Amino acid sequence: MRIIVHTKHGVFYGIESDYNESDYLEATSFLKRLNFLEYFTLTTDDGEVYLPKEMINDSVFIIEKQENN
């Protein structure tokens, strides 16, 4: 599971973590409240990506769910 953010400045991929339903539901609940935040920090394999409120409101957030087989 990971968060992917599509912005006008590029696509940012959060770090991958093992999928479980509880974490997935928590992440979806968090993303629903993003528009109330002043900023969001996404941890990637290369470091941290800081998205101010303006970028949050102009981006598409995806939670990629990959269940282990």
Image (cartoon, helix red, strand yellow):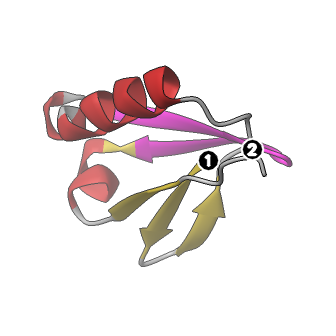
**Could you say where residue 27 lies in the image, as x and y percent from the top left?**
41, 32
Q: In the image, what residue type sits under mark 2? A: Glu
From this viewpoint, which residue is outermost toward the left? 36
State whether residue 40 is above or below residue 65.
above
* Mark 2: secondary structure: loop
Q: Which residue is mark 2?
A: 16
Q: In the image, what residue type sits under mark 1? A: Arg
Q: Which residue range is magenta in the image? A: 39-51
**Could you say where residue 16 lies in the image, as x and y percent from the top left?**
74, 44
Question: In the displayed structure, does residue 38 sit left or right of residue 67?
Answer: left
Q: Which residue is mark 1?
A: 2
Q: Nearer the viewer, residue 2 or 14?
A: 2
**Could you say where residue 19 lies in the image, as x and y percent from the top left?**
64, 36
Task: Residue at 52% x, 34% y: name it.
Answer: 41
The rendered magenta stretch, by its main secondary structure, is classed as: strand
Task: Residue at 55% x, 52% y: name it.
Answer: 65
